[in-house]
Image (cartoon, coloured by chain):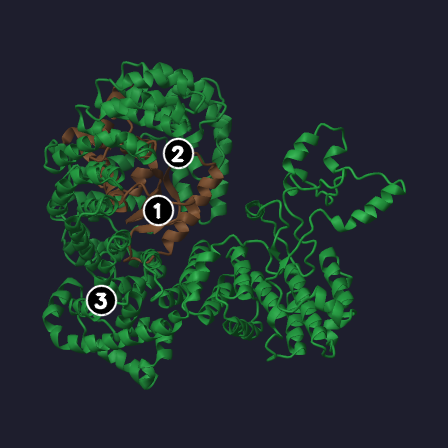
Chain colours: A brown, B green
Amino acid sequence: MIKAVLVINTQGKPRLTKFYGFLTVEKQQELIRSVFGVLCSRAEKVSNFMEVDSIFGPDSRLVYKHYATLYFIFVFDSSENELAMLDLIQVFVETLDKCFRNVCELDIVFNYNKLHSILDEIISGGQVLETSSTEIMRAVEEISKSESASNSISIVPKTVSGWRSR
Amino acid sequence: MEQLKTIGRELAMGSQGGFGQSKEFLDLVKSIGEARSKAEEDRIVLREIESLKRRIVEPGIPKRKMKEYIIRLVYVEMLGHDASFGYIHAVKMTHDDNLVLKRTGYLAVTLFLNEDHDLIILIVNTIQKDLKSDNYLIVCAALNAVCKLINEETIPAVLPQVVELLGHSKEAVRKKAIMALHRFYHKSPSSVSHLLSNFRKKLCDSDPGVMGATLCPLFDLITNDANSYKDLVVSFVSILKQVAEHRLPKAYDYHQLPAPFIQIRLLKILALLGSGDKQASEHMYTVVGDIFRKCDSSSNIGNAVLYECICCVSSIHLNPKLLEAAADVIARFLKSDSHNLKYMGIDALGRLIKLSPEIAEQHQLAVIDCLEDPDDTLKRKTFELLYKMTKSSNVEVIVDRMIDYMISINDNHYKTEIASRCVELAEQFAPSNHWFIQTMNKVFEHAGDLVNIKVAHNLMRLIAEGFGEDDDTADSQLRSSAVESYLHIIGEPKLPSVFLQVICWVLGEYGTADGKFSASYITGKLCDVAESYSSDETVKGYAVTALMKIYAFEIAAGRKLDILPECQSLIEELSASHSTDLQQRAYELQAVIGLDVRAIGSIMPSDASCEDIEVDKSLSFLNGYVEKSLEKGAQPYIPENERFGMVNISNFRNQDQLEVTSHGLRFEAYELPKPSVQSRTPPISVASSTELVPVPEPSYYRETPQTAPVPSSSDTGPSGLKLRLDGVQKKWGKPTYSSSSASTSNSSSLKVVNGATQVDGVSSGNSKTHETSYDSRRPQVEISEEKQKLAASLFGGSSKTERRSSTGHKVAKASSHASEKFHTSKSTTIYSADNVVEKPNLVQPPPDLLDLGEPIVASIAPSVDPFRQLEGLLDSTQDPGTFGGTKAPDFMALYAETPAGGRSAVTNPSQISKGPNVKEALEKDALVRQMGVTPSGQNPNLFKDLFG
């Protein structure tokens, strides 16, 4: 089971946090801080895996990937496969990239409700639900379409027009 | 076009807030991005909270404004501030009919609330309604909320609808309904126990995605109870076969691999079902073998599937062919350049090692490389592997390595773990008493405060009881070696309390036993301990009792007692101590000193710590006195729990089955405050005057027969004796270990040297391939003699395997240089037995000398400059050693669209062709920088390595 999905920038600011079990706000902050602390001290050419029992309790592993200014972090237990999780991060980021065209940190800050929709398509209740970025895109696209139909609020003009041109 | 759009976006942001958000939100994010300290950020967020608090309650807020407030609340909470004042508004938003608002509301509540929050009750109704909605997007949103917000009590409220949705026409809804049901199962298995068959049914869903999702709950169910699902083995195997044969639609391919995530999950399930079941396993052999053959090992996900295959093979009934395939994959993983794959390889090796230990021998050098890798994760995983493969022949090397690593790290959590592992291995496999004591000393010295107190008690007991055989001389040798080593260590500053307790106890009990050290010397040392750790009462207690023992033994031996002045002052000081325990001990000591030889001989017999002390639990020796008192008209004693009426009597009798039948009265020991528990516990410390810190261990006593007086060894501290001493003693019994292991490791090291010299000639053929696959700055391939020796002592490999593995690698000239240095420094003693023992120490320091120079540079780099870090990210082929030299390629060059410089090497062709895209990204990056969101951002093509 996946315990948490975190996106933290290289300065330790959380950009997206999703915990699949309930934690108090203080505890969440503490975890984010300690995860960031450990990630900072990692050398560059090392593995993307870590055992984080000391932070998240027994049977916790962490997989992270560093993209430009962001760390994408998945925390999970032994019922998942580390390499597969690494690819799940890839799926997530690929989807973001499709969705925002060269996604950058700013997109993530301003559209994190959209990010949450994407994440909810991939992971549900801590279990991996969907792993094809095209499928995820289709679902998210449909949500956006009907959202824009039901309301004149345009969430992200860029992305909507981007889809049409595809 | 793209560029225009970006500019448009920027304009929009400036005026009315781009990204659909208002300028205020934009400003908030911007100012937080620019905040220089946590305090400044907090100030900004608090101001934001104040303004939100004020505004959110204003009447008649337009809905889109409200939506933004909610988003801002979520943002504030993500930054770690309390946004609970707004929860109710998020709840209200879920009631809205508008899809956008509803989804925002659901998003906010799933992030804000836990399943037991008071506001949930307000949402359940909405969820019920939404689950019935015609719009499947609303249903999906509601199902997402169900996963997070529904608790055991509210499950029945939504369960019927969720079950109904399992048959929904949209596969997205069916998938989410399965997940919701799975979640219910997690929260309260009984609530959905009658619905579990649904999961089986959904396995046959027409949509492969739904089938894949069903595997999640099935995996959990099978983990709990594999036997009820054995009938599904054939189905799972056939599904896996179809998936592996590309029968699923192309859409399920990921990196050219057919539905790898489904394959992984199926393999996990098969591993569970085939474990210990030959019949079930036989169904699986073909398909797993097929996957081994077909799976593409060049992609990350392909390796993930292969790794899962190995796990499966190691779990199901053994099949030699599959084992071979698994070993091949492991070999590929370990030889890989990627740390991730090495990690998986080590992990997989740990799984297979139980089935076939010889696999590890083939990879011994790779394992040693991993052990010396600067990557902590890999190192720890390797230690885990070593822990699994420890046997009596390699325990010394492994434990020494572990201790060295333990000393080097600061992470207390892992330190504790590795310390307890060291202790466990030492207890199980120790080749000699001397080594055992030395090892324990090291563990206590460096991690004493982290190890379980039981370990200390166990050590004391081992020293006291000797090691099983009736060989008294060996026991006394052990004790004197312990005493000697402790006297040596005792002077070190800041020893952990637990260790000092052991030291004091051993010195008190055996310090003067062999006559090597005088009583005044030992007592002087004990006084020093008591003085320098004056704040630790437990240690002081141990020290005083140790003093008492030594004085008692002196008197018993008929020697003149010579109490050092500092001891005298210590005793006086303690007899006025605030701690009643210390006071008691001090007075006891004074009393004991005053006694004559005969009395002391009976209260403090020498070397009697293992003698059983008979505890007369019923205190029958007082019977005469009690009777006399009763005759004189004294009140009979009524146990405490009988004093308030007779209600408890039967209860009491049941609990306490002591034989107090000879009298009508119960002569119980005075009850301690908690009668129900304590009445079972024999009064342990009554009779043992030397007992220091009784640590009651009820579970231990429960095992001893209640009727007999409890045999408790007085001094070892009857606590913590539950450890598996029996096994240990047996293993320790064999005196052959110490001599044989020394000789074997010695001879094997010789073999290695032979092997290495042989290899030198042969290596040239293989070295080429290695030099190409490993890049030039990784001299790790050069195997030093030290490493080989280490390998030999770890794996104890036969000379045959030794040669095989070493020919697989390259022994370069440089390595012989390095080893030569060792030879000269260590001169010719290198083959002596002592040296073999010292070997780990030899190997430990040379990393910079041997091969780890580069990785160390790499590990320093990130702390230097985030820019450089990014450079490394950009150009992965670049040597980290040249970091200092290369500066970021000129920005203008990129604007001019010349894909020159180091960038072009890694830029994906598609990215280059998308020319304007780069620009757009650049613009965006510039904007971002301007926003202060990503001050360290250097790479304009932020995610280009994504496709690389």
Please tell me which residue is depicted at 61% across the width and 73% down the height of the picture. Answer: B511
Q: Chain of mark 1?
A: A
Is label 3 in contact with label 2 (beta carbons under 8 Å)? no
Say which of marks 1 and 3 sits in front: 1
Q: Chain of mark 3?
A: B
Work out whether residue B141 or residue B802 is closer to the camera in this orientation and state it: B802
**Real-space CA distance between mark 1 and mark 3, rounded to the nearest whole angstrom:** 28 Å
Work out whether residue B129 or residue B719 is closer to the camera in this orientation and state it: B719
Q: Position of residue B378 (x, y in %)?
A: 31, 57
Q: Which residue is mark 1?
A: A61
Q: Position of residue A98 (x, y in %)?
A: 20, 37
Say which of marks 3 and 2 sits in front: 3
Three-letter code for the amino acid on which mark 2 is drawn: Phe
Three-letter code for the amino acid on which mark 1 is drawn: Arg
When the figure is inspected, residue B433 is found, relative to residue B99, above or below; the finding is below
Q: Which residue is mark 3?
A: B778
Q: Is residue B673 toward the left or the right of residue B293 in the image? A: right
Please tell me which residue is depicted at 36% across the width and 50% down the height of the picture. Answer: A51
Please tell me which residue is depicted at 38% across the width and 30% down the height of the picture. Answer: B186
Q: Which mark is residue B25?
A: 2
Q: Is residue B689 visible?
A: yes
Q: Identify the secondary structure beneath mark 3.
A: loop
Q: Is residue B317 toward the left or the right of residue A32 in the image? A: left
| Screen quadrant of the N terminus of chain B | top left
Q: Position of residue B143 (x, y in %)?
A: 33, 23
Tell me which corner region of the image, top left, top right, bottom left or bottom right, holds residue B574. bottom right
Question: Badge 1 local density, few (<14 within 10 Å), some, or many (20+)?
Answer: many
